[in-house]
Amino acid sequence: MTPGGSTPLGILSFNAAYLQQALSAQRHEAPGAPTLEVFDHHKKHIQKERAVSQLDQSRRTEYLRDELASRLCDRLLDINRQFPNVLDLGANACNIAKTIASSSDLQSRISRLTCAETSSSLLNRDDEPKSSDSIEIVKEVLPSLETTLPYEAESFDAALSSLSIHWANDLPTLLRNVNHVLKPDAPFIGAMLGGDTLYELRSSLQLADLERRGGVTPHVSPLADIRDVGGLLTRAGFKLLTVDVDDIVVEYPDTFTLMQDLQSMGESNALIQSVGGTGLTRDVLLANEAIYRQMYTKGGPGAMAPKEGKIEEQTEGSIPATFRVIYMIGWKEGKGQEQPLARGSGETNLKDVLGGGDFKGQ
């Protein structure tokens, strides 16, 4: 990618003027419509289709999705039960299917996997995994992840979603739809970008804006915070919630490579066009590159760098980019499901277990 003109920056280029416009427009929407239309799903579909047209580059930039698919499947393995029928919502390039096909433990627990995705080209980009003979893999193209899912109620034993639902305009409706198609006492396990994802790029772009334009414009789209996810799952009807966060630091040779990889992932800016919005110019991008390097050094122990489609140890002279991943597990309510004990019903003092002094004032 060459630094010139405006640029599609994945999860970037959010303009404050758009937010005011969208909030005003939503006052006239019919009941049941999303509270705030932030993302243009048609634009996102085009971006995914276009990314797949550069086949080698598209496959090379699957390192983040492959890593998250592996971590998500590890969480599924922690649940000691069989999952005959599983839904992968927002399957992207069937990264979860590839992970399952490479694990004998997962293959022994899953009989059928439905991979649902909005982009036909991305969904069908690769051949079926070589070790998938023991699992029936069904690929289905959906018009949207937020509309009513075309499946019978209580038809899946588990639902997974990896790096897709952060682009949802109406996350509560999406989660309710997932809850609807799950069998009683079945889990939903998801991973989405949130919080301070790409905070390094956001900070450096703000300073570059200030230096070259004399003002600051936000350039990072809104992402869910971990504190919001629990409430969203509860509103959707899920029980026994588990929500945690993990920072994945990936090293890149420069900011332009970072932006190019985001584009090749199909993670470019998909915000609804704002009125009077200003793209990132060549001057701002060049200033951003210098500021980014000056502010942020290597990510330290545990930082990774993409190499040949995988994430490996970082290299000298690289810059870090942090992807904050929010993991969530929620269970559909069912008969016989374990319930949390009532508040104050504990019989063991934590002090007796961990040791230490008295708790004053209690």
Image (cartoon, rainbow, N blue to C red):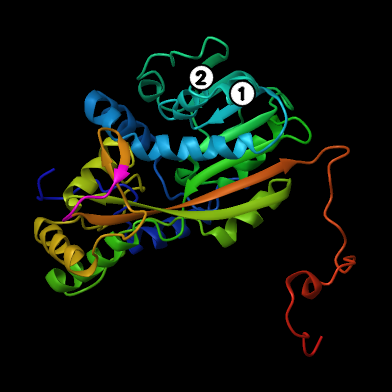
Q: Residue at x 21, y 58 (%)?
A: 278
In the current view of this chain or complex, which residue is farthest to the bottom?
Answer: 361
Q: Residue at x 32, y 36 (%)?
A: 310
Query: 67 or 118: nearer the eye?
Result: 67
Q: Quadrant of residue 274?
A: bottom left
Question: Which quarter of the image is occupied by the C terminus?
Answer: bottom right
In the drawing, does residue 73 fall left or right of residue 340? left
Q: Is residue 255 above or below residue 208?
A: above
Packing grade of label 1 (10 A; few <14, some 14-19, many >=20) is few
Residue 87 position, x and y percent, is: 60, 27
Q: Is residue 224 at least partly visible in the picture? A: yes
Mark 2 vs mark 1: which is more N-terminal? Answer: 2
Q: Which residues are magenta?
A: 312-317
Predominant secondary structure, magenta span: loop
Residue flagged by tag 2: what amino acid is it?
A: Glu
Reply yes or no: does residue 27 show up in magenta. Answer: no
Question: Which quarter of the image is occupied by the N terminus?
Answer: top left
Count the marks: 2
Real-space CA distance between mark 2 and mark 1, rounded to the nearest whole angstrom: 10 Å
- The residue tagged 1 is 150
Q: Is residue 146 at least partly visible in the picture? A: no
Secondary structure of the residue carrying numbered label 1? loop
Q: Is residue 282 above or below residue 102?
A: below
- The residue tagged 2 is 140
In the drawing, does residue 81 fall left or right of residue 14? right
Q: Are marks 2 and 1 in contact (CB under 8 Å)?
A: yes
In the drawing, does residue 299 fall left or right of residue 132? left
Residue 81 position, x and y percent, is: 73, 30
Residue 79 position, x and y percent, is: 69, 36
Query: 295 or 238: nearer the eye?
Result: 295
Q: Is residue 123 above or below residue 304?
A: above
Packing grade of label 2 (10 A; few <14, some 14-19, many >=20) is some
